[in-house]
Image (tube, helix red, strand yellow):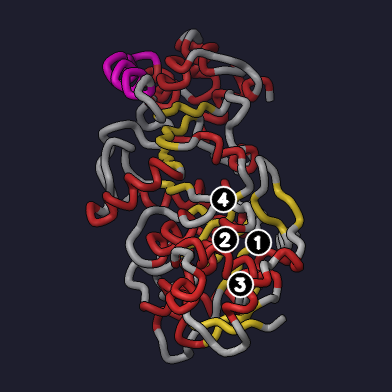
């Protein structure tokens, strides 16, 4: 499709993305027929009607959007704010493959992350402490292994996954259901600020868009579309996380689920996915192995195979062979707990250590 390589002005793509009551599918039809945002904007009402019908053509022809476009361009001129159009070379390649990709994404933070390979981590907003700990640990392992972690900035599992990913170099993308000049939920405002500094906030919604209920299921297709696969940590039967998992299956992406207690309502969604063919996983290495990513870690701008022999002897001695906590190892080594968590996640993937109940670890090799 020719529009994928054109360099149309941001103003034209903004205009196209702001068209009222058109939607992603019909926007893709316009692009297929006209080739670019600029060509659509310059088309006659008659030509538009031949593609979408008279009513839609009349609405498009009558749309101006000048004030919204001006506001967006002013916002994009600020440091670390981005407009990522489907015509841009760095538009996420996997997202472009879904049936209804957004023609424009608003980004705030580290734009280069959209070119990274990603893994989605989602789950319940009402997560258990154990579920949150699991999401943090898995996300940190993924981020340590050069995968960018993609949740949706919700409370619970999403927030825990973001925090885990921020502790390592793969970092995180938060796909939100509002305009990027708003944060929802408000309780995650400090987390959103940290993601804007170290990761990337991403939205298809124009500035000023409030947290409308219908926007959150729609954003799940972006979470899935960006990712090689989706991991569901905890989810009830009616969880929105299952929408993301369904999107992943529709997009031909891997779906993973962590099993839980048969007595917990938050296990039923994941168990249902496993019954339907999702891959049951018990640790991060299960996911990385399925993705062909096992043994990868962030290097100088690329992914390098990690040699298990690189574990320093001083750290081996500090671990010993008895169970230990992160805080205990921090005291023994003088390193910070967050820094050690990233290393422990990687060593667990490599089989050097194993995690025990209660968040403790034990050296295996």
Gap in Å between the C-alphas at discs 1 and 3? 36 Å
Residue to which mark 3 is pinned: 315
Residue depicted at 35% across the width and 23% down the height? 78
Residue 235 coordinates in the image, percent (x, y)? 44, 72
Residue to which mark 1 is pinned: 254
Q: Is residue 310 visible?
A: yes
Q: Nearer the viewer, mark 1 or mark 4?
A: 4
Q: Nearer the viewer, mark 2 or mark 3?
A: 3
Q: Secondary structure at mark 2?
A: strand
Residue 307 coordinates in the image, percent (x, y)? 76, 62
Near-viewer residue (333 or 88): 333
Q: Quadrant of residue 258?
A: bottom right
Q: Dominant secondary structure of the magenta stretch?
A: helix
Q: Secondary structure at mark 1?
A: strand
Query: Along the horizontal axis of the image, is 143 left or right of 309?
Result: left
Q: Nearer the viewer, mark 4 or mark 3?
A: 3
Residue to which mark 2 is pinned: 230
Q: Nearer the viewer, mark 1 or mark 3?
A: 3
Residue 291 coordinates in the image, percent (x, y)? 71, 60
Magenta span covers which residues? 61-76
Q: Sequence-wise, which precedes: disc 4 or disc 2?
A: 4
Gap in Å between the C-alphas at discs 2 and 1? 6 Å
Residue 213 sits inside the magenta stretch: no
């Amino acid at each position: 499709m020719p529009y994928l390589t054109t360099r149309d002005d941001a103003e034209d793509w903004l205009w196209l993305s702001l068209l009222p009551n058109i939607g992603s599918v019909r926007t893709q039809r316009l692009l297929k027929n006209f080739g670019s945002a600029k060509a659509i904007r310059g088309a006659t009402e008659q030509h538009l009607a031949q593609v979408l019908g008279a009513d839609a053509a009349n609405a498009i022809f009558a749309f101006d959007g000048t004030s919204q476009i001006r506001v967006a361009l002013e916002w994009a001129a600020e440091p670390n704010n981005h407009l990522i159009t489907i015509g841009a070379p760095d538009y996420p390649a996997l997202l472009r493959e879904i049936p209804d990709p957004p023609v424009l994404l608003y980004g705030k933070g580290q734009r280069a992350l959209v070119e990274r390979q990603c893994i989605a981590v989602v789950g319940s907003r009402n997560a258990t402490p154990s579920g949150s700990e699991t999401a943090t640990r898995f996300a940190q392992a993924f981020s340590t292994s050069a995968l960018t972690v993609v949740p949706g900035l919700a409370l619970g599992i999403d927030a825990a996954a973001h925090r885990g990913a921020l502790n390592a170099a793969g970092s995180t993308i938060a796909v939100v259901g509002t305009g990027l000049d708003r944060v929802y939920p408000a309780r995650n405002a400090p987390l959103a600020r940290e993601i804007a500094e170290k990761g990337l906030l991403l939205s298809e919604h124009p500035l000023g868009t409030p947290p409308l209920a219908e926007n959150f299921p729609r954003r799940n297709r972006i979470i899935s579309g960006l990712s090689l696969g989706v991991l569901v940590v905890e989810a009830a039967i009616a969880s929105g996380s299952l929408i993301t998992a369904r999107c992943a299956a529709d997009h031909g992406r891997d779906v993973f689920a962590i099993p839980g207690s048969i007595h917990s309502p938050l296990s039923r969604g994941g168990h249902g996915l496993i019954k339907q063919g999702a891959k049951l996983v018990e640790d991060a290495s299960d996911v990385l192995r399925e993705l062909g990513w096992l043994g990868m870690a962030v290097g100088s701008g690329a992914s390098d195979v990690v040699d298990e022999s690189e574990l320093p002897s001083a750290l081996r001695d500090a671990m010993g062979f008895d169970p230990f906590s992160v805080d205990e190892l921090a005291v023994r080594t003088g390193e910070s707990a967050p820094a050690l968590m990233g290393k422990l996640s990687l060593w667990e993937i490599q089989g050097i250590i194993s995690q025990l109940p209660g968040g403790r670890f034990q050296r295996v090799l």
